[in-house]
């Protein structure tokens, strides 16, 4: 006898096959597993919207090119970050989390906490 309730509406219930589950994890690794993505997401989640220079100043050892490429990927491929024009003259932009990106907040926070608890050594 199953202890899990059966869905009443099979159209609204999504069944994930093992293959789909693996594909989902592989896709998540592509988003979160890139060296700087978690750092960028964590900074924007904890500090809020930031300009490029401000964000670069908060992240140790990241080059401008890598930050620019990472922000572009997080914006265009994953819709986790948005680029907003703050002023036209001089052109000033800031980067902020999208709603979709903010949905990752508990995950990013927990990964950070786990790292502090288990990885960071004094």
Image (spheres, helix red, strand yellow):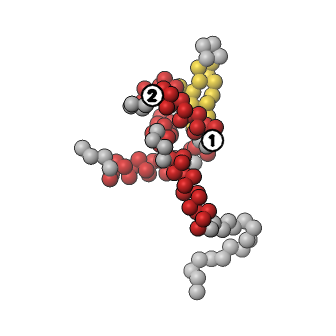
15 w.r.t. 121: above or below: below
**What secondary structure is found at the residue carrying circle 1?**
loop
Residue that mark 2 sits on: 63
* Res. 106 visible in picture: no
Q: Nearer the viewer, residue 110 or 31?
A: 31
Query: In the current view of this chain or complex, which residue is farthest to the top?
Result: 89
Give the mark nearer the N terminus: 1 vs 2: 2
Quarter where residue 59 is shown: top left
**Residue 91 drawn at (x, y percent):** 61, 17
Q: Are marks 1 and 2 in contact (CB under 8 Å)?
A: no
Point 74% across, 71% down: residue = 9
Residue 60 image-quadrant placement: top left
Badge 2 density bin: few <14, some 14–19, many ≥20, Cα 10 Å? few
Is residue 76 shown left or right of residue 122? right
- The residue pinned by badge 1 equals 77
User: From what the image shows, is residue 53 above or below residue 8?
Assistant: above
x and y, in percent, of residue 88 in the image: 65, 16
- Relative image position of residue 68 (x, y in whole percent): 54, 29
- Residue occupying image coordinates x 57% and y 27%: 94
In the drawing, does residue 83 fall left or right of residue 118? right
The residue shown at (55%, 55%) is 26
């Amino acid at each position: 006898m199953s202890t899990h309730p059966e869905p009443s509406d099979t159209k609204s219930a999504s069944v994930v096959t093992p293959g789909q589950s693996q594909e989902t994890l592989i896709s998540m690794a592509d988003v979160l597993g890139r060296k700087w993505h978690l750092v960028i997401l964590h900074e924007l989640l904890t500090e809020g919207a930031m300009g490029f220079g401000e964000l670069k100043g908060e992240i140790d050892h990241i080059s401008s090119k890598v930050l620019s490429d990472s922000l572009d990927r997080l914006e265009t491929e994953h819709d986790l970050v948005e680029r907003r024009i703050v002023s036209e003259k001089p052109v000033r932009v800031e980067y902020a989390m999208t709603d979709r990106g903010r949905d990752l907040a508990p995950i990013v926070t927990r990964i950070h906490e786990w790292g502090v608890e288990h990885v960071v050594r004094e």
